[in-house]
Image: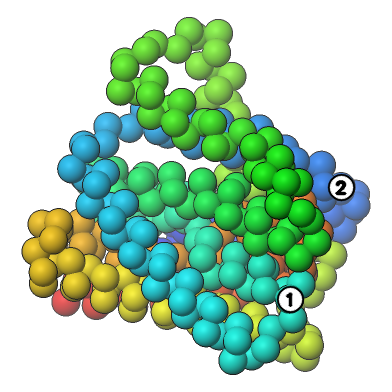
Amino acid sequence: MTIFISILWNNVIPLSVMIALGITLHRVFSLDIKTLSKLNFYLFSPAMIFNLLYTTDIPVNVLFKVLLFFFLFMALLYGCVEAAIRIRKTPRAMKGAVRNSVLFYNSANYGIPLNQLAFASNAYTLSVQVLIMMMQSLLPNTYGIYNVNSHKLQARDIGRTILGQPVIYAIPLGLLLHNLHVPIPLALSTPLGYLANAFIGIALITLGVQLGSMKLTFRHPKIKDVLVSCALRLIGGPLLAAAVVWLLRTNNVTMIDSLMAKALIVSSSVPTSLSSVLLAVEFDNEPEFASQVVLLSTTISIITVTCVIYFLHI
């Protein structure tokens, strides 16, 4: 019960308050969702990921183990999503939105606070979560863009769009400057900190603005797709992560210790990322579906995330 209350109070309620503010502001002022989306993609998100990678120490052996887990986990998760798409005969224009809703999860503004809560702000488990967040920041700005545009744009145009995303440059730059111990002048580090700190708030406001123009209804024609995506994300995610961890530990491939194993499973249990909504809005690909998945998965995660942490504790 203590874990349940802590997750509810420290994670879900703050997120809900910010989303509610976005809904209210949109209802009163009719905010421009496209402008907010561009601010997230081209300014706040790159600053946040660069700042976190620049300031966090990540051992090389931890990097290797986490990346190996991540690629195996994502391959299995992708297979499950593709199976669901084929079984349900999802229309081509919607396939990208469904994939994004399951493959991209909220490893930053939900995953990091959750990691600190579940593991008492342990620096080791935090480094694991930062690496997961790094990959989850890179994927939406590469594969995610391809996903939502593959049915309507040529490969050359998609490639040009991907190369225009600042995040794909912020990640290697942040890692490089950190490892080379290159100091950033105060004139740059101060505004960078302002932008990084603004990311979570602006992203949640953006989600609220999108939700403000719609309503969650179980009579919606795509509600079954929403429920399938939520189930794959919140139940399939941690189950597949546990299977990958078990496989690696059984075969002694990477010497994954118990604490890292738990951190990796918890990292996979979080709800759908705001990135899926930002992508859907920015490239006009099923924004209503994406918003409903984020809203419902975040709500249901109160129960599912608590169960994952509980089972890991026992």
186 left or right of 5?
A: right
Q: Is residue 122 above or below residue 171?
A: below
Residue 268 appears anywhere in the view = yes
Q: Residue at x 41, y 65 (%)?
A: 74
Residue 249: quarter of image: bottom left
Q: Residue at x 60, y 65 (%)?
A: 100
90 left or right of 186?
A: right
- From mark 1 to mark 2, how far is it between C-alphas? 28 Å
217 left or right of 306?
A: right
Query: Amino acid type of disc 1?
Result: Arg
Which numbered tag is attached to residue 92?
1
Q: Give the structural element (helix, strand or loop) at label 2.
A: loop
Which numbered tag is attached to residue 228?
none
Residue 97: quarter of image: bottom right
Which numbered tag is attached to residue 32?
2
Q: Is residue 180 above or below residue 138?
A: above
* Residue 166, x across and y down, in percent: 61, 33
Disc nearer the start of the sequence (1/2)? 2
